[in-house]
Amino acid sequence: MFGKLSKSKKFYLMLSAFIIGVAMGSFKIQLLFLAVALSILTIILFILKGRIIVILIIFAIVAGFFWLQRSVPEKNIENIHFFNEEKVIVEGFISEEVDLRSDHQKLAFKTEKIKFEDSWRQIKGLVLVKTELYPYYEYGQILKIECLLRQPGKIDDFDYEKYLARYNIYSTCYNSKIAILEGEKGSFLKKYLLKSKKYFLNKINRILPEPHASFLAGLLLGVRKGIPKEIMEAFNRTGVTHIIAVSGYNITIVAVALMNFFKAISISRKKSFYFAVLGIIAFVFLCGASAAVVRAAIMGIIVLVANQVGRKTNTLYILILAVFIMVMINPKILIFDMGFQLSFLATIGLIYLSKPIEKFFKFMPETLGLRENFSTTMAAILTTSPLIMYNFSRISLVAPVANILILSAIPIAMFVGFIGILLAIFSVYIGQIFSWITWLILEYIIQVVKILAELDWASINLGFGLRWVIFCYVLIFILLYFCNNLKIVRPGQYFRSDNL
Amino acid sequence: MLSKKTVKIFVSILAAIFILIGIILKEDFSGLNLSSEASMPIENRLEIHYLDVGQGDAILIKTPHNQKILIDGGPDMSILDQMGKNLSFFDRQIDIIILTHPHSDHINGLVEVLRRYDVRKIYYTGAFHTSPAYLEWLEMIKQKNVPLEIIKEQRVLALDNELKLEFLYPFEDLMNKDIKELNNTSIINKLVYKDKIFLFMGDAEKEVEQELMDLDIDLDADVIKLGHHGSSSSSTEDFLKKIDAQYAIIQCGEDNSFGHPHLSVIRRLERLGIKIFRNDLNGQVSVFSDGERIEVVAERIVY
């Protein structure tokens, strides 16, 4: 069976096997179980006459399994979470952008030294520090913290431990005593990026009132904390959260919308592509280039490339390679990072489903890329819904309508908003006046979402067990296979109906 | 480069924008504001919005001549949404900010307000306090170069011919004084619009109430914002009788850990026949007045 495979196919098969191994490791599968499963697999594969490739695949699975295991730090005196449930004095620095909430700040604190029996001792590991709203902390500041470390636990149904684990955080600290020490640490580039992000954020806040300011900040800078609860809830109910939230899933969709926008205003396809790619790269830098955003941006660019080149088999290889590299860097994202999963699934949907789906929406006008936007979003919704239903136990019934009404407005809002910021750099007053237009477009989006969210049936609670999720994805993959077994179309062409 | 189609699209977008602007302008420049819910005509109308910022104080006043006064800023950033909700989208100026006292549930939101809005003038007591929020706030004032004035005696600000802002308390200069009971350093002020009087007590407690009564200061008011979130340490029966208000407003958060407002205060108000509005139950409470009548609009009605 495997003998016929080309070398490159074998290569990608192994990469996939590695990824599967990481997934198995993430689910805390016992070693014994792994051994049994692998031997059964081996036997099956040998019956199918594999030979060397079989051994390589199994090796890749095992490697993936241990790669995940290796990424979990041991609980020993070298690592800070050894001291959980103890009162400690530690020194270190803020190693990520400060997470500023409405009533508190969260710091990712990288420990370096710990006071242990009256002497300082080397230590490593991250602590999540929750502290008051003031004073404002900044990336790179060196701090001395005295506090009671705690192991992250479950908050209601939310598994905080797993959530933090993907950031390599195994200790939390509330009610700490913090002293700011002299000096700075951290990467120079990141410091600079975060500074400019803050600068742009300040400009947005000067020219727009809330909640519009937070909304634009979400679109342009990837900040999504300041949006009021009731509006966030309305976004969820109408199934349009993807335009701002969930660590980067938005990038994929917004990138396509951006490209369609450029095309709609008569910029050539090629130029539109480059503009959209440039847009994504600019966005990554504006956001402060966090790992999640970089990952999502790579997915977004893959979608654009696929859209441009139109050869879908090669895209699959690129996608597998990208996932492999990301999982090599941080194996925990595969199972624990929903943002990563969503952007991966959305990417698959956009590449393989949006064209076939577009066929069903030929009645829609092509103005402003309306039809393409709609079919791409529907494709993304289709592939991401089961996972969203599994995690949030709900599905939005008005999502298609909401998406038609607002998606084309997003690139315009981003564009006008960006001009407003640029103007505000020269004069806040001119920026303020110009941003009345921005306000209007954002207000339109907010009102659409609010009105639709008020419908009783806008979203229904429908929880999905793991079994249903798997069933759905099998179904979707059959659909994908069916669609893509048809003649692959070149961009701009539609399916000939006799192929169906 | 632009095709006919593109031009068409742009024209239609522009048209849509103008229609929307038209709709907004028609509704007296405040079309999308809460205030449109009041039945009182907008001309010569004083608006006082007791903002729903959770457990803390924040009051936004819009005078008939569109001056904006903010008393305190609440415990967190939620003030920003409330400001967005109650001001027109193009409104970026606050004429006066009054910080009654520097406790976190009154000052925390003000730092961001200062950063985002053009503030013309700030009144405070100058009392000594070293909380990070207060220091950050003072730093921001310095950065933005906002004129700062200390309230150390009774004084009257004429906002226009018929509208006065009167500071009643404190009587002494508290600049850099380290006072244990910061609540009792609260600025107490009242707004007098023709016949109608609105009293704002900050977090003042009964000792201050007694002081005011002893000095025989004119405390008559139609609407009072109760001292200290309706705690039993404020609003004595004698004091409430003296004020003889029609409405009492309590700024407190839902299920707050302090148990504000205290049941005895509620009973006292009910006994005196004063109508109560609370941010925890009513959401935002807005008071409108043309100087002769008063209309109270609550976001949520509680039966």
Image: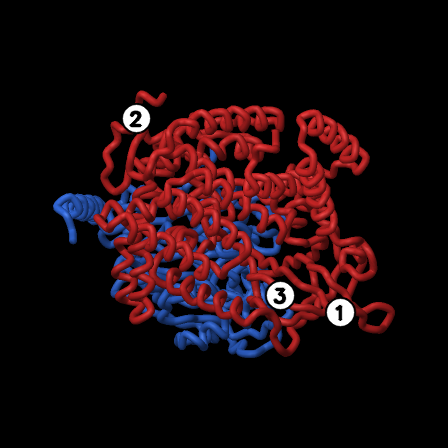
Chain colours: A red, B blue
User: In the image, what residue type sits under mark 1?
Assistant: Lys
Q: Which residue is mark 1?
A: A113
For marks 2 and 3, give the CA distance.
57 Å
Q: Where is residue B182 drawn, in percent x and y?
A: 59, 67
Q: Is residue A58 shown above or below A464?
A: below
Q: Earlier in the sequence, mark 1 or mark 3?
A: 3
Residue type for callout 2: Arg
Instruction: Choose between A399 and B8: the one closer to the eye.
Output: B8
Looking at the image, is mark 1 or mark 2 nearer the viewer? 2
Residue identified by numbered label 3: A94
Mark 2 Cα-neighbour bin, 10 Å: few <14, some 14–19, many ≥20:
few
Tag 1 secondary structure: strand
Same chain for mark 1 and mark 2? The answer is yes
Which residue is located at x 51 percent, y 63 percent?
B107
Q: Residues within 10 Å of mark 1 (few under 14, many from 20)?
A: some
> Is residue A363 visible to us here?
yes
Towards the viewer: A462 or B102: A462
Residue linked to disc 2: A496
Residue at the extreme left: B4
Near-viewer residue (A369 or B232): A369
* Residue at 50% across, 59% down: A289
Of the 4 image quadrants, the one containing the N terminus of chain A is: top right
Question: Which of the marked residues, 2 or 3, is nearer the chain's N terminus?
Answer: 3
Label 2 element class: loop
* Left or right of A403 on screen, residue B169: right
In the image, are marks 1 and 3 on the same chain? yes
Residue B221 in view, yes or no: no
Q: Is residue B91 left or right of residue B225?
A: left
